Amino acid sequence: MDKLMDNHWFLKGLALLLALMLYMFTSLDKPSESSGITASTGLPVGETTETLSNVAVAAHYNQEEYVVTGLPKSVTLTLEGQSNLITATKINQQFEVYANLNGYQPGVYDVMLQYEGINDKVKVKILPAKVRVTIAKKIKKAFPVEIGFINSNKMKEGYMTDKTAVKPALVEISGTEAQLEKISLVKAYIDLKGADQTITKETKVVVYDKDGNPLDVQANPSTVTVTVPIITPEKKVPVNVTRQGTLQEGVTITNITVDPEQVTLYGPNDVLSNIQSVDGVVIDLDKVTSSTTFDAPIVLPKGVTKASPDKVKVTVQVQKQERTSFSDIPLQVLGLTDAFNVNFLDPQSGKVNVDVVGESSVISKLAASQIQASINVQNLAPGTYDVPIQINSPNNVTLELKQKNAKIEVVKKS
């Protein structure tokens, strides 16, 4: 059955059969007239006149070599004859109105319109019956396709277009030399309303003259594929780490690292220009008891649409500290000349106690002999003085003195 419906002659036969059935029905329904003339129209019984508007006009010519202009897109047909024949003509829609331009050379001509596919018993009038057409040599030229945007101000906030791509980048336009000389712009349009991701779309090519008026010329292909990347402006900024709370006694932070140290923010340019860093990565010192690594989400500044990456890895390195004391560390006297002696008044023993704070593994290896305590009496004349006590020790420990100064007496040797 599908094959029959695709057969041109089968459809014509079916349409004719329907027309005949309609004719028989209308004939049986009409009263006979001895005069054979209807009272209302003056036409023989069963005849009528009907007007068909907007009937398309075709042109028969060598379309590979020539371009025809001036031909109207449609005409009006007046059909006069038996109503059944006119009805069949309307149902079939197998007729054509055309201008036969085969064999014509380039030039301007007044040609009579013709028709085919209408029963010879039907009288046909074409309005207009004659048309003036211009036949010109067809030429072809390639033009680049530009991309135009519609609703570019209605994209999703914070987004913008990047470099677009169109395939093919050139289209071939056919027409007369005069038509092609008028071409100023070939464009394909993309609607950006609500756009927040890359758009790939097939869109129609429109050809314009210098005044922005569309031109009726043929482009090949008539559509192109346009790809518009949708992006947001970006900016790299460092990540700030904030400490809150208090470390437990005996715990010291030795290093904090953030990986990566910078993140990329996306958003409107006017927002990004005011952002120099990202805050919101917090280390809770109350919970830090040992070295640890954790993921911290990036808190987006106001107006920023996204961050890449959206989280960073924070590593906190700590040392557990130990406190110990070393007693009787002798005070060395520096800068004393042979002409003087120093008597210690406080401490009378000339020795001090030192508290040492540091990592337990370091303190366990520390000896009293590695700690040096001293006072400097250079340029002091005989008399009583309070001089600061200076201490030195290996790196990675902290020394604390309960007695900051030593009271001494400088005397001249006898």
Image (spheres, helix red, strand yellow):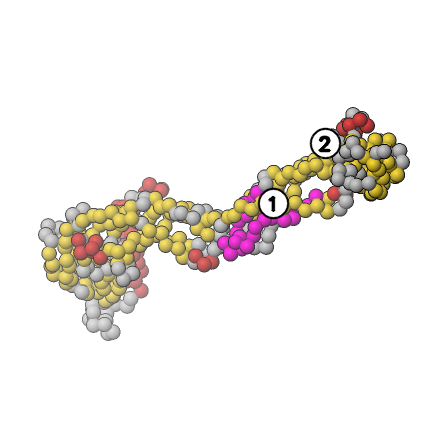
Image quadrant of residue 336?
top right
Q: Nearer the viewer, residue 322 or 291?
A: 322
* Label 2 Cα neighbours within 10 Å, binned few <14 / some 14-19 / many ≥20: few
Residue bearing mark 1: 239
Residue bearing mark 2: 395
In the rendered structure, which amino acid carries the disc numbered 2? Answer: Asn
Can residue 291 be seen in this snapshot? yes
Q: Residue at x 61, y 42 (%)?
A: 311
- In the rendered image, residue 271, in percent from the top left (x then y), is placed at 54, 55
Q: Nearer the viewer, residue 336 or 126?
A: 336
Asked whether residue 352 is drawn in magenta, I would say no
- In the rendered image, residue 126, in percent from the top left (x then y), is placed at 18, 63
Q: Which residues are magenta?
A: 262-283
Image quadrant of residue 110?
bottom left
Quadrant including the C terminus: top right
In the rendered structure, which amino acid carries the disc numbered 1? Answer: Val
Q: Residue at x 23, y 64 (%)?
A: 76
Look at the numbered disc 1 and give the secondary structure of its residue: strand
Image quadrant of residue 359?
top right
Q: Residue at x 65, y 48 (%)?
A: 280
Q: Nearer the viewer, residue 121 or 357?
A: 357
